[in-house]
Amino acid sequence: MYKAKIIITYRKSILDPQGKTIENSLHSLGFTKINNTRMGKYIEYEIDTNDTETAEQIVEETCKKLLANPVMEEYSYKLEKLE
C-alpha cells in the first residue's frame, strides 16, 4: 500500500490573487522579507497496491483527470510505502 502526497499550484504564468492577498497580509504584520507568495492545494490518499508503477499511474491519472486543471495548474507528488 502507498500513500500519495500531492501538491497542486498555479503555473508560474498564472496570476495568484490568493497568494498576493496572503503576501500583503504578511507584509502588514511586519514580515516584509516574504515575496512571491503562492497558494496551492495539498491532497493525500492511500492506494491499495504494492506495485510502484501502478501507484504512480493512479496518481498521474487522478491528477490529470480530476485534481489539477492542466491549463492553469501544475502538480508534484511523493509516494510513501506503507507497511
Image (cartoon, grey):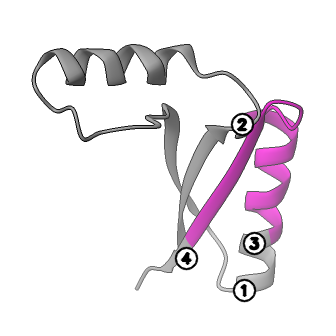
> Which numbered disc, 3 or 4, marks the residue closer to the eye?
3
Q: Are marks 1 and 4 in contact (CB under 8 Å)?
A: no
Callout 2 amino acid: Leu
Residue 56: numbered disc: 3
Residue 59 location in percent, x, y? Answer: 73, 59
How far, Cα to Cα, is label 1 from label 3?
9 Å
**What is the C-alpha distance between the residues marked 1 and 4?**
8 Å
- Mark 1 and mark 3 in contact? Answer it, CB < 8 Å: no
Circle nearer the N terminus (2, 3): 3
- Which residue appears at 85% of the width and 53% of the height? 61
Name the residue rendered at 74%, 46% in the picture: 74
Residue located 44% across and 80% down the image? 82
Please check the rendered image and state whether residue 73 is part of the magenta-colored stretch, yes or no: yes
User: Where does residue 39 sit, x and y in percent of width and height?
Assistant: 48, 31
Where does the C terminus fall, quadrant-wise? bottom left
Residue position marked by numbered label 2 in the rendering: 67
- Residue lying farthest to the front in this orientation: 32
What is the number of the mark on residue 40?
none
Disc 1 crowd rating (10 Å Cα; few below 14, some 14-19, many 20+) is few
Q: Is 68 within the magenta? A: yes
Under mark 4, the amino acid is Met
Mark 3 in CB contact with mark 4 (< 8 angstroms): no
Q: CA distance from mark 3 to mark 4?
A: 12 Å
Report helix, strand or loop for mark 1.
Answer: loop
**Helix or strand or loop: what does disc 4 sit on?**
loop
- Which numbered disc covers residue 1? 4
Q: CA distance from mark 2 to mark 1?
A: 22 Å
Residue type highlighted by circle 1 = Asp
Which one is earlier in the sequence, the residue at label 1 or at label 3? Answer: 1
Quadrant where the N terminus is found in the figure: bottom right
Q: Label 3 is placed on what type of residue?
A: Glu
From the image, state whether disc 4 or disc 2 is nearer to you: 2
